[in-house]
Image (spheres, grey):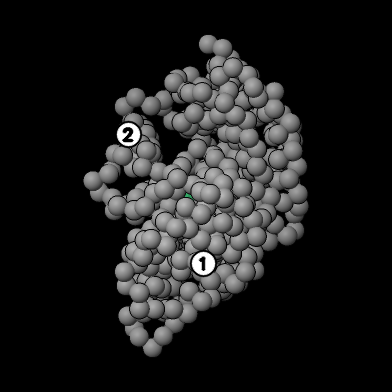
Amino acid sequence: MSDTTRSAHHVWLPYTQMKTALPPLEVTATHGSRIVLSDGRELIDGISSWWTACHGYNHPALLTALQKQAERMPHVMLGGLIHEPAKELAARLAAITPGDLGRTFFSESGSVSVEVAMKVAAQAHWNRGDTKRTRFVSFLGGYHGDTLATMAVADPEEGMHKLYRGLLRDEHVVPLPKNDSDLIRFAEFLQEHDDVAAVLIEPLVQGAGGMRFFSKKILQGLRAACDDAGVFLIADEIFVGLGRLGAMTACEKAGVVPDVMTLSKALTGGVCPLAATVVREPLFEAFYSDHAEHALMHGPTYSGHALGCAVANASLALFESEPRLEQVRAMEAQLAEELEPLRGLRGIIDVRVHGAIGVVQLESIDDMAALKTAFIKRGVWVRPFRDIVYLTPAYTTPSEELSALTEAICEVVDDYRKR
Ligand SMILES: *Cc1c(COP(=O)(O)O)cnc(C)c1O
């Protein structure tokens, strides 16, 4: 290969000002909770590759499932065909999701699974004869993906939303209720707007919008408000689902059954792109009719990708054969203890932990590059954004490596705030 074909000159990186950003680090391998760089250095990963690699990198059970499936059948179209890995995965998802959530539509990215959820919710109303319900309610601080429909339900102050405003539909993005009186106002708002098809929420933790936590009482109140108004509730569990909060789903932890749930990031343990939109039985029944036009018209080319489904089945099996949720609970305690020294220091607004998420919120971060570089120097992969430095490690991260991550955060953040 020539030097030109080896260089990064043809790659356009995500969320990156290609002219001014720090050059990307070249990765040649991964193992456990580590990223191996081309110059031989190893970084302990505090982010698990955008929250996907929940069992650590290169888990043998996942690699074996991938290899076995690859030898037999990497993929066939799901139009008119079905296969065992997809059937097994849909059954597994029905078992781990709360209530009568039980019918799964497969896609290949989180954003698309949210778009499918939005189409399902709206069309279910239409199929039942209520054609005015064409809009969505979502919350400030929320994030549901980067496609046009999902950007429109994100926080409008988000850079991306602002930037693409002219392209986006006008949705109801409202403050997340904080208490009972807010919940009453929210219920009234839903009653007054008969154009709403569904409410979209990231249950218990708003992730990419700033790692903000809220109580299960609020989620329960939103569920009740949706029920009263005849509006569907879509729980976007792409970040919080599959163990991140110490339960298989955040909704289960909160005792709430949404009408639709989306899952993706940790679904294949970070091995294959795959996403699921899981729907409750009564909603599915709105599509199950003698009318062709009542069918859901969506069909990703790679829907039910066999490699992805096989790996996801192996990944979900690991939650049964290895003590994954106990590991998350132990991680929660360790994160809380080891990040605590930062609490109350000048320049630090908040330290908060929920499950395998540890967050240090600063007054502001104005030299992001300095902070990122300091972490790499310390041998850890930590990616601050907005005003927060956070950890979302693999659930299997050994306790001494977790300590290396929290120590790095304590020292780097302490240096940074004293500048
Ligand atoms: C990451 C994320 C998405 C988007 O998933 P992609 O696979 O990046 O399209 C949607 N919702 C939430 C809550 C996410 O964290």
Q: Amino acid at mark 2?
A: His
Circle 1 — which element? helix
Please state, as top left, top right, bottom left or bottom right, where the N terminus lies in the image.
Answer: top left
- Is residue 47 visible in this depiction of the protein? yes
Q: Is residue 333 left or right of residue 202?
A: right
When the figure is inspected, residue 402 is found, relative to residue 328, above or below; the finding is: above
Q: Is residue 130 left or right of residue 400?
A: left
Determine which of the numbered discs, if any, sits on residue 217 in the image.
none
Which mark is first along the chain, 1 or 2?
Answer: 2
When the figure is inspected, residue 402 is found, relative to residue 72, above or below; the finding is: above
Front label number (2 vs 1)? 1
When the figure is inspected, residue 418 is found, relative to residue 78, above or below; the finding is: above
Q: Quadrant of residue 223?
A: bottom right
Residue lying at 69% horizontally and 34% vertically, measured from the top left: 335
- Reading the image, the residue beneath label 1 is 227
Q: Is residue 149 left or right of residue 385?
A: left
Residue lying at 49% horizontally and 28% vertically, measured from the top left: 387
Q: Quadrant of residue 107?
A: bottom left
- Reading the image, the residue beneath label 2 is 9
The answer to whether the beta carbon of the residue marked 2 is less than 8 Å from any atom of ligand 1 is no
Q: Quadrant of residue 267?
A: bottom right
**Residue 389: percent from the left, percent from the top?**
55, 30
**Residue 348: percent from the left, percent from the top?**
58, 23
**Residue 341: percent from the left, percent from the top?**
70, 23
Residue lying at 55% horizontally and 16% vertically, measured from the top left: 417
**Residue 53: percent from the left, percent from the top?**
59, 47
Nearest the viewer among 403 and 252 is 252
Residue lying at 74% horizontally and 35% vertically, measured from the top left: 334
Q: Amino acid at mark 1?
A: Asp
